[in-house]
Amino acid sequence: MIDDGTGLLTIGELARATGLTVRTIRYWSDEGALPPLTRSAGGYRLYDAASVARLELIRTLRELGLGLADVRRVLAGETTVAEVAAAHVAALDAQIRSLKVTRAVLSTVARRGSTAEEMTLMNKLARLSAAERSRILEEFVEETFRGLDTADPVIRERMRATTANLPDEPTPEQVDAWVELAELLEDPEFRARMREAAEFNAADRGHDTPDGASLWFARRLVQLGAEARERGVAPESPEAGQVLRDLLGNADPADVLERLRSTTNDKVARYRELLGIVNGHGAVAAHREEFAWVVAALEARAAG
């Protein structure tokens, strides 16, 4: 406090009173957040007791991450602390989400042992917006069904409605699954398999097959295949023949076997599993064992 009876404080005295450095206080003063009340005859900045309280508010707002522009607006009465805090919370939420995506990507990179190029691609894929992810799947569906006007509309709409809902705060497993899914959608072999399945389905529609018949058949196959496996029925046994008759009805076993061989493979199963992981449902059952059992049972009859 200067010895002139005014009770005013120099920057040095203000620093000792608050524990802040002279350099910090001078910087905030230069930036207009803490203007001096007046100056001494020698040109030194002088502050009053209210400046101490103002300085404490500035320090608190800065420690909470607010920029000096927002601090000046609060101090000038242009906005309230509550309004600035709400805006800052929104900004922090966005930053936290971004950091969690960054953490998930880096965790995946570390686990995969990825190269710099793979890491760059992974980061780009992880930060796509929901609309951009939906567009990737939409383009895949359009290519799969292009020109197949008679394809089962139930399946077409079900695939069209399928989305990869990577959350704002994905786990490393979800990031890994989304990257693998995006890579799979670009895989020529996988696309060929899905196209072939769509063509088979379109051929069925050409014979007045009811809407949703393919989905019904798949569910029926899973049910009967699971029951047969639970009972320990061997695919080559006579009992397996009855299971197939219940499943196929009047359908040609050779034709069904051809279609299942074409459409039942690890990549198609992995596609369903990855979607489940990305969407937070866990690895959706691909029913690999049930399909494999039916294929084995059909192959046993074909060989016999």
Image (cartoon, grey):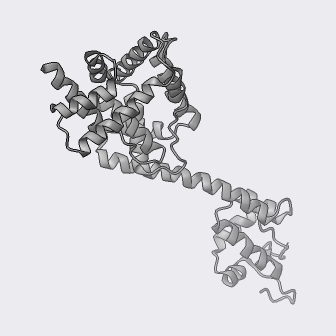
Q: As drawn, is 2 to the left or to the right of 115?
A: right
Q: Is residue 186 something one can see in this rendering?
A: yes
What residue is rendered at 65% in x and 54% in y? Answer: 91
**Which of the two residues, 240 or 267, is positioned nearer the viewer here?**
240
Residue 267 drawn at (x, y percent): 32, 30
Marker count (numbered):
0
* Residue 181 location, quadrant: top left
Residue 143 drawn at (x, y percent): 47, 17
Q: Is residue 48 something one can see in this rendering?
A: no
Q: Image quadrant for the C terminus?
A: top left
Q: As drawn, is 140 to the left or to the right of 58?
A: left
**Which of the two residues, 92 or 299, is positioned nearer the viewer here?**
299
Against 185, residue 73 (above or below) is below
Q: As drawn, is 233 to the left or to the right of 75?
A: left
* Residue 195 location, quadrant: top left
What residue is rendered at 27% in x and 19% in y? Answer: 253
Q: Image quadrant for the N terminus?
A: bottom right
* Residue 188 location, quadrant: top left
Residue 121 drawn at (x, y percent): 41, 35
What residue is rendered at 78% in x and 82% in y? Answer: 9
**Which of the two residues, 53 or 149, is positioned nearer the viewer here?**
149
Against 216, residue 71 (above or below) is below
What residue is rendered at 86% in x and 63% in y? Answer: 77
Residue 283 drawn at (x, y percent): 38, 45
